[in-house]
Each structure stands twice: as C-alpha cells, then as structure tokens.
C-alpha cells in the first residue's frame, strides 16, 4: 500500500510531475503513479479516486494543464486531501490551470501549489502525512 496517489491526465504530463517522485522517495513516503484523465477516462478516474482511501492512500497529488479539471474532479470524489499542480501548457503558460485549480467551488477543497511546482506538492504531502 502506498501513502500518496499521484495522478496526471496524460503521459505527456509525466515529466512535469516527476520532481515529486524524488522528494517523496527521499522522505521515505511511498507513492503510486497513474495516468488517468478526468475528460478521456472519467469512469476509470472515478474508480481510482473513489477507492483511494480503501486502498490505503492518505493524500492525492493531481497535476493538470489548461482547464486543470483533474484536481477538482478528484477532490469531488474523495475526502482525502488533494494537492493540485497546475502545469505550464497552452497559450496562457499555466495561468488558466492555476486559476482552475485554485478556484474550485466551495466544499470541494484543493490545495494549490505554484505552476509546475511538483516539488512543493510533494513537500506538502510529506507535511500532511506527518500530522
């Protein structure tokens, strides 16, 4: 069982989230990485996230660019802490992803780190796990 579930919506996003892997490994925190899109595989993503607690996950890190739906989608399906990582893609260079991640509607909390800052998402996950 892993402590942190890491999600991105596309295989192309993997290099942007990989800096989190090293931080978690250095802290001795186990993680599991999945590519699962809120748009292209909503059923698969729903199953993965809604079953996360039962599988022993304690925190979810979700990275997304453009509309950045994945962090909010994940947070709507679980009561686990969700940390969103907006990615610098598209014509707005991540500003749209930052706003979409930070401005999730009330009642669906998502912690938001800076654009392309997967390292801080991992550091935050480590701190959450130490509480």
Image (spheres, grey):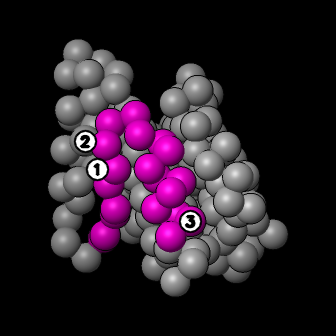
Please determine whether, in this image, residue 21 is positioned above or below residue 93: below
Please rate how many residues cluster around mark 3, counting C-alpha atoms within 10 Å: few if below 14, some from 14 to 19, many from 20: some
Question: Vertical placement of 22 versus 91: above or below?
Answer: below
Q: Is residue 78 magenta?
A: no
Q: Nearer the viewer, residue 39 or 58?
A: 58
Residue for point 44% across, 50% down: 120
Residue 111 sits inside the magenta stretch: yes
Residue 33's tag is none
For this view, does 33 lie left or right of residue 16? right
Q: Does label 1 or label 3 sit earlier along the sequence?
A: 1
Q: Which residue is mark 1?
A: 101
Q: Are marks 2 and 1 in contact (CB under 8 Å)?
A: yes
For label 1, the crowd category at 10 Å Cα-Cα, with few meaning under 14, some 14 to 19 and many 20 or more, is: many
Who's the residue at 58% across and 45% down the image? Answer: 20
Please state the extent of the stretch shown in magenta in the rendering: 108-127
Q: Residue at x 28, y 38 (%)?
A: 97
Between disc 3 and disc 2, whose residue precedes? 2
Tell whether 90 sits left or right of 22: left
Q: Which residue is mark 3?
A: 126
Residue with the mark numbered 2 = 98
Measured Cα–Cα span from mark 2 to mark 1: 5 Å
- Viewer-side residue, 74 vs 94: 94
Q: Is residue 9 visible?
A: yes
Which secondary structure, mark 3?
Answer: helix
Residue 17: image quadrant is: top right
Circle count: 3
Residue drawn 69% across and 68% down?
3
Residue 63 in the image: x percent, y percent? 46, 43
Q: Nearer the viewer, mark 3 or mark 2?
A: 3
């Amino acid at each position: 069982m892993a402590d942190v579930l890491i999600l991105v919506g596309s295989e192309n996003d993997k290099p942007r989230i990989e800096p989190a892997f090293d931080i978690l490994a250095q802290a001795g925190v186990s993680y599991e990485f999945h590519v699962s899109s809120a748009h292209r595989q909503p059923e698969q993503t729903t199953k993965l996230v809604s079953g996360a607690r039962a599988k022993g996950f304690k925190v979810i890190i979700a990275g997304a660019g453009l509309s950045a739906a994945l962090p909010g989608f994940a947070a709507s399906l679980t009561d686990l802490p969700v940390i969103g990582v907006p990615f610098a893609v598209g014509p707005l260079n991540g500003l749209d992803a930052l706003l979409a991640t930070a401005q999730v509607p009330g009642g669906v909390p998502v912690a938001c780190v800076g654009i392309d800052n997967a390292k801080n998402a991992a550091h935050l996950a480590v701190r959450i796990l130490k509480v």
